[in-house]
Amino acid sequence: MLSIRNWSAYYGQRKVLGPISLTFEPGKIIGLIGQNGSGKTTFFHSLLGLLRVEGEITLNGAPVTQKSLVYLGLSGSFSDRDLKRRMDEIFEENFIYNGKSPIALSHDICCRIGKGLTGREQLGSLSKGMQQKFSLEMLLALDPQILLLDEPFDGLDQIGIETLKQSLKDQSQQGKIVLLTSHTFSELDALLDELYIIKNGDFHSVENKEYLTEPGGIARIYKREMG
């Protein structure tokens, strides 16, 4: 269980988030929605230790470590010349190395997604959906307990969206905690276990879970709450 207590984040001396207290159960996919600048990405950055914070965050009663979580803004496409460079960047973004070889890991991931790429080949031939899946697989290989995904569906076609949604469901079934943001609410229909609407740095839980399963339900509750 991820427990966040009296959590606030600051840019310099200015408070930009909180205080908030939240609890996220294992095996859940949790959506965070709100207007631009409401605090979604700020929340992720605070969990990653990129901002000055106050409060306490624990995972199963112990302090959260960088090995426990990974972050990826999946909206960007591959523009690197080879696989190793991209993998090194993602590992560096997450402050996690764990002694794993990016090239050895790339071979295993390529086999799993059914692509015969080698560690020195370009990734430009992959569809954006496969690029997203590849990026996610790289992070999942680190065996995190918490996934922070910022706008993961941005730019994907319908096949890519469904592929990514299934990957996230698979992870939740393995007991992972998946936190994600999206500005396109239809992509969240029938995916989320919990939903929070963020307004001015405050988190408002959607208690009526029927909104999460009905087509267009998330858009309706968002419009009502934002009024």
Image (cartoon, rainbow, N blue to C red):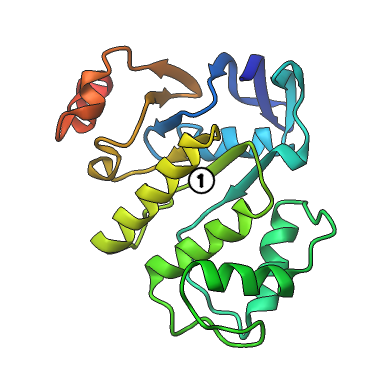
Q: Residue 140: x, y in percent?
A: 60, 51
Above/below status of 133 relative to 209 = below
Image quarter of residue 14: top right
Nearer to us in this view, 203 or 94:
94
The residue drawn where x is 32% and y is 12% is 207
Nearer to us in this view, 226 or 132:
132
- Quadrant of the image for the N terminus? top right
Above/below status of 150 relative to 206 = below
Residue 222, visible in the rendered structure? no
Left or right of 7: which side holds 192? left
The residue drawn where x is 21% and y is 19% is 210
Left or right of 134: which side holds 190? left
Q: Which residue lies furthest to the right in this view?
A: 99
Q: Is mark 1 on a helix, strand or loop?
A: strand
Q: Residue 206: x, y in percent?
A: 33, 17
**Which residue is the site of mark 1?**
149
Image quarter of residue 12: top right
